Image (cartoon, rainbow, N blue to C red):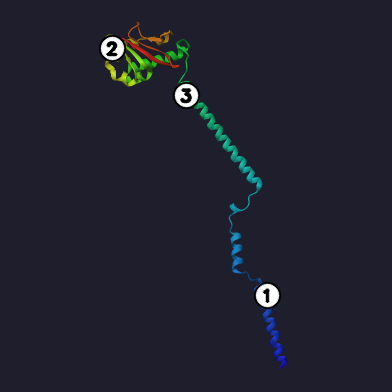
Amino acid sequence: MKKKILMLWIVGTLSFGLLACGNSDARTPAQNTEQETWETIPESTQKQDPEETRQSEEESQTTESTVAEKEGSESASEEKMKQDLVAEYEDNFSVDNEAVVAYARKIKEAVANRDMEALADLASYPLYVGFTDGGVSVTSAEELIALGEEKIFTVQMEESIKNADENSLSPSMAGFALSTNGRPNMIFGVVDGRLAIQGINY
């Protein structure tokens, strides 16, 4: 009887030991989840190499500097173009011949096309218009346009401006007189640093 009890005790002890060893190798669900979570972390979230980070920042700064320099260069170029389009002059005697010829041709083109709006844009205000029956002072582009083509672009005015020699214009205190034989004419000169028509005479 004692031997039988002893045998049962030994078998029970061995069985318990084997069961304990088996459980020690097993991982809990929480442990499995932690390992799987770590293994599935994207590479992009892992710690970057400090050297790679520094190089990336330097490249970004270089790119931003290049873009800024390009934009600055474009802005300077645009500003220069605007200044070239709007030349500044002190008086009629400071205007170079090339600018005088170019402006006279703009006037000739507006008259040839009977373009009241173009002519109005070339004038300064108040503008003196000396008709054969009396002179008037025009205070705006709209007022000049309202006078009408027939009154401004007379046959005599069209012929005088068409045949005028824009290459032989000489400066005076009054400006440059664009005409064939004196009258009719259109007088233009420097107004506020720019060329503009100052008078139209019939």
Name the image quarter holding the N terminus: bottom right
- Rendered location of residue 102, percent (x, y): 42, 15
**Residue position marked by numbered label 2 in the rendering:** 155
- Rendered location of residue 65, percent (x, y): 58, 35
**Residue position marked by numbered label 1 in the rendering:** 21
Label 1 sits on a secondary structure element that is helix
- CB atoms at circles 3 and 2 under 8 Å apart? no
Spatial CA span between label 1 and label 3:
90 Å
**Residue position marked by numbered label 3 in the rendering:** 82
Mark nearest the camera among 1 and 3 is 3
Residue 73: quadrant of the picture? top right
Label 2 sits on a secondary structure element that is helix
Q: Callout 1: 10 Å neighbours few (<14), some, many (20+)?
A: few
Task: Tell me: residue 46, above or below residue 164.
Answer: below
Tag 3 or tag 1, which sits nearer the N-term? 1
Label 3 sits on a secondary structure element that is helix
Tag 1 or tag 2, which sits nearer the N-term? 1
Q: Amino acid at mark 3?
A: Lys
Mark nearest the camera among 3 and 2 is 3
